Amino acid sequence: MNLSSYFEIPKISSGSYKVWQRNKDVFMKDSKLNFLPPFIEPVLYLIALGFGLGRFVENIDGVPYAEFIAPALISISVMYASFFECSYGSYVRMYYQKTFDAIIATPLTIEDVIAGELLWGATRSMINATVMIPVIALFGLIDLRYSLLIIPFAFLGGLLFAAIGMCFTAVTPNIMSINYPVLLFITPMFLFSGTFFPLNALPVIIQYFAIAFLPLTHVVNVIRSLGYGILEFSLLFDLVWIMVVCTILVILSINMIKKRLVV
Amino acid sequence: MFGFLGPNGAGKTTVMRMIQCVSPVTSGSLEMFGMDATSHPREIKSLMGVVPQENNLDIDFTVHENLMVYSRYYDIPREKAKERVDELLDFVQLKDKKDTMTENLSGGMKRRLILARALVNQPRMLILDEPTVGLDPQARHLIWDRLRLLKKQGVTVVLTSHYLDEVEKLCDRLVVMDNGKILVEGSPSSVIEKYVGSGIVEAENNPELVECLNRKEASYEIIGDLVHIYTDDPKHITEYLTMVCSVSKISARPATLEDVFLKITGRRLRE
C-alpha cells in the first residue's frame, strides 16, 4: 500500500449531508440533555476557576483572570465536542452499531459517511460555542463586537478536532484504546495551550512545540482575540495553520477509515 | 431466485459484498444491470436491496424512523417515503411495532424489518445473506412467503444460506462454491440428479455389505457406521440388498441438496 493513497482527494457527494441529518436527528431526540452541558459547564468553571481561583491571580495582560479563561472554555468545548463525537461516538456507530455498514449498502459511499460524521462533529462544536457565548456574555466576560465570528470559527476548529478523532478511530484496535490519545494528546492540550495560563509562562522550547503541534493553541488564540474584541493581523497565521492542518487531516482520516473498512 | 451455497469461508459473502459494490473487485470484471461495479457503484446500489448477514438496524431509531431515515439515503421524497414505509410495514407485518425501538424487537421481527428496509427503494434485485439464521419456523415461513411474492413481482432474488432445504424450496438456480471457485451450477433438481441421483439408500456399514455393493458396481459412500448408496432406483437396490446381501436394517429416501453439498465439499469441518 503506498503512502500517496492516503492523500488522495476523496470523492464526496451530497449524500454526506444525509449522514449529517441522521446524526442530527438522533441528537435532537435527546435535545434537552444534549444542550445542557454547554450551559452548565462554563458556569461551573467560571465560578470555580474564574471567580474562585481568579481572586488569587493577578491580571494577565491587563485582563482579569475570569475574562482570560472564558474564551479558553469555549475553545476547550469546541475541542471536546467534536473530538469525542468522532472518536468514541463514531467508533460505536462503526463497530458496535454497524451503522456505517447499513448506510454503504445504499447509494452512499464510505467517503460520504465519514464526511458526514466529520461535518456533524464540527456542528456539535459550533452548537456548543453558540450556547456558551450568551452564557459567558451574561457574566460580562466577552466583548460582543466580534463574538458572533466565534460561531463559524468554532465549526472550522471543530472540523479539525473531528478529523483528529476520526484518525484515531481508524487505527484504534478497540474502544478502550481511545483512552491513549485522550490521555496523551487531548488532556495535555487542555492544560498547555495557553488555556488557563499564558503560553509564555512555559519554557521557550515548549512554547514552540505547542505552536507547532498543539492545534488547540491556535484555536485559543483566535477565540481569545475575538472574545476580547480584537482583530489582529497575527490571527491570520493561526487561521492558515488551522486550515492547512484541517484539510490534510480531513483527507487523511477519510482515507484511513476507508482502508480500515473496505476489505 | 438464485442461491450461493458453500461451506463457511468459501467466499459467498465476499461475492455478495462485491455485487453490493462494497468490496473491491481485485481481478476480472463485475457487471450489474449492464454497469461496471467499479465505476458505477452509486447507480448500481440505488437499484439494489440488501439483507446483510448481521443485523445492522439503527438502534438509535424506532421501527418507523429506521425506514424513513433509510429512505432518505435513497433520496426518496418524504411524502412518497411515508406511503412506501406504511406499505412495507404491512408487508412484513410490523405495523403494530411502528414506534418500538429496534432493540426491543424479537429476532424474527428484526429480520423482517431488515427485509422491509431492503425494499424501500423498490429494488430490481434483492440480495440476502443468510436471511433466516436463528429464526423460528413461523418467522422463516413468513420470510419465504414474502420472498416468493417478490419473485412474482419480478424482483431478482439472490441469497446465500446454510439451510439447504430453504435453498431447495426457493431457488430456481444455484451454485455450490468452495475456496472461491464455483464447483456446481444448475437448478436444485438437476444438481441433485446429476451428482447423487434421485434417491439414497442408507444401510449399516459392514464388510459383507460393502463387498456385495462392489459386486453390483453400485455408487456408494461410507460415512462412519453408515453406508450411503446413490441411485435413481432405490426400490431395485433395496430389493437387491435384502434378497442377495441379506441386509436387514435399511432405509430409502429422496436425495436432497444436503447430500450434494456434502458429497462435493466433503465432510471435513470448516473454520
Image (tube, helix red, strand yellow):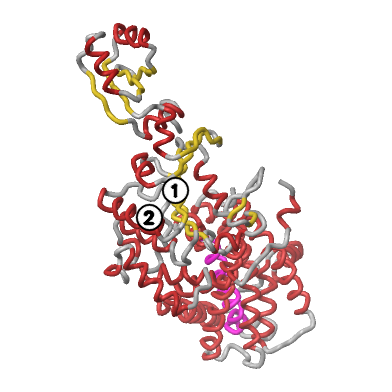
Q: Are marks 1 and 2 on the same chain?
A: yes
Measuring from the top left, give residue B271's x and y in whole percent: 45, 33
Asked which secondary structure carries label 2, the reply is helix
Question: Which label lies toward us, 1 or 2?
Answer: 2
Of the numbered discs 1 and 2, the one sitting upstream in the chain is 2
Answer yes or no: do the residues labelled 1 and 2 have beta carbons within 8 Å? yes
Residue sticking out furthest to the bottom:
A145
> As rendered, which of B128 and A168 lies closer to the eye?
B128
A195 lies left or right of B190? right
Q: Is A83 contained in the magenta span?
A: yes
Q: Residue at x 49, y 57 (%)?
A: B125
Pointer 1: what residue? Answer: B159
Decide: few, some or many residues near mark 1? Use Cα within 10 Å; few <14, some 14-19, many ≥20: many
> As rendered, which of A151 and B250 lies closer to the eye?
B250
Pointer 2: what residue? Answer: B147
Residue sticking out furthest to the left:
B248
In the rendered structure, which amino acid carries the disc numbered 1?
Answer: Leu
> As rendered, which of B125 and B252 lies closer to the eye?
B252
Is residue A127 visible in the rendered image? The answer is yes
Residue stretch in magenta? A65-88
Measuring from the top left, give residue B102's x and y in whole percent: 35, 63
Q: Is A128 contained in the magenta span?
A: no
**As displayed, is residue B254 above or below residue B204?**
below
Label the magenta part by its dominant secondary structure: helix
A117 lies left or right of B102? right
The residues bearing labels 1 and 2 have C-alpha atoms spaced at a distance of 10 Å
